[in-house]
Image (cartoon, rainbow, N blue to C red):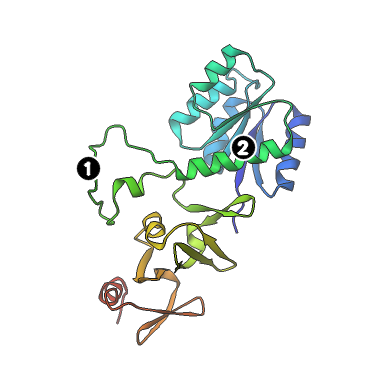
Amino acid sequence: MAKVKLLIAEDDVVIAHNLSFSLEDMGYAVCQVVSSGEELLLEVHKHNPDLVILDITLEGKLDGIDTAAILSKSSNIPFIFMTALSDKETIDRAKLTKPHAYLVKPFDVRTLQSSIEVAIHNASSRLQQPATAVQPAVGAANPDGATPEETGNYLLHDALFVKVRNRLEKVALGDIVWAEAQDIYSNIKTSQHVYLVSQSLKNLEQRLPSKDFMRVHRSYIVRLTAIEAIEDNNILVGGKHIPIGNTHKDALLKRLQII
């Protein structure tokens, strides 16, 4: 299972070191620690983190707020400010960049963790409306069959975040084998785990890319590349026999190369 990747910008070596250890103890992956805004802007596109945590006071010409403003224009990566500054002028500057959280030092690890989890959850589910695109009529379907309100433009296109106990775990789309309806919930199966999520199969179908996934039964979605065999009216996926619905069989066969 892929860990949530965090990039830290902090100019105090001791604080950066302790923060990195604390985050790794929580189960996150710290992909890089930098001390300046300029370095952050160079490294962020190399590592593509899920979240950036940055101090407002940094080395170099760019402070944390300047850096965040540039970052928000060049990417959709969410970010959290951490700082000892709580004056109105600084907060007003920070608000213009629309951070996902603003933590005033000192703060405890539980506050940090909850801020990270909320920030990632909001970032992964927030709908982004294109500023220049012509908006379809309400209820109009896109090429995948889902309405604009249902699909949106998610910040992370290669993963879902699934709530497990008191944390959100990153599940790469490439690891998902199949999904199964469970009343108003759904099971998501990866090679290692089965997750119960509070989404109907219909809603989940709209979040999974149609080029990789397909509804094959009223109760099942499968990843096409995970199909091992087709026998009669069943698909073998990850060692599980999944039924093929009559209304889906022809469409499924058209997606496969049969010789």
Q: Is residue 18 above or below residue 191?
A: above
Q: Nearer the viewer, residue 67 or 176?
A: 176
Q: Position of residue 100 (x, y in %)?
A: 54, 33
Q: Residue at x 66, y 47 (%)?
A: 28
Residue occupying the point 44% across, 62% down: 184
**In percent of the image, x 34 and y 60: which residue is there?**
210
Mark 1 and mark 2 lie on one chain; the one further toward the N terminus is 2
Residue 226: x %, y % from top left: 45, 71
Q: Residue at x 60, y 67 (%)?
A: 192
Side (left or right) of 125 relative to 218: right
Which residue is labeled 1 in the image?
136
Q: How many marks?
A: 2
Q: Residues within 10 Å of mark 1 (few under 14, many from 20)?
A: few
Q: Position of residue 12 (x, y in %)?
A: 74, 26
| CB contact under 8 Å: marks 1 and 2 | no
Classify residue 6 by image quadrant: top right
**Residue, disc 2:** 115
- SS category of the residue bearing label 2: helix
- Quarter occupied by the N terminus: bottom right
Q: Amino acid at mark 2?
A: Ser
Between residue 86 and residue 18, name the one nearer to us. 86
Dot 2 crowding, Cα within 10 Å, few <14, some 14–19, many 20+? some
Q: Quadrant of the C terminus?
A: bottom left
- Estimate the x, y position of residue 79 in percent, counting from the top left: 55, 33
Q: Amino acid at mark 1?
A: Pro
Label 1 vs label 2: CA separation? 35 Å
Quadrant for residue 214, please give it.
bottom left
Residue furthest out toward the front: 183
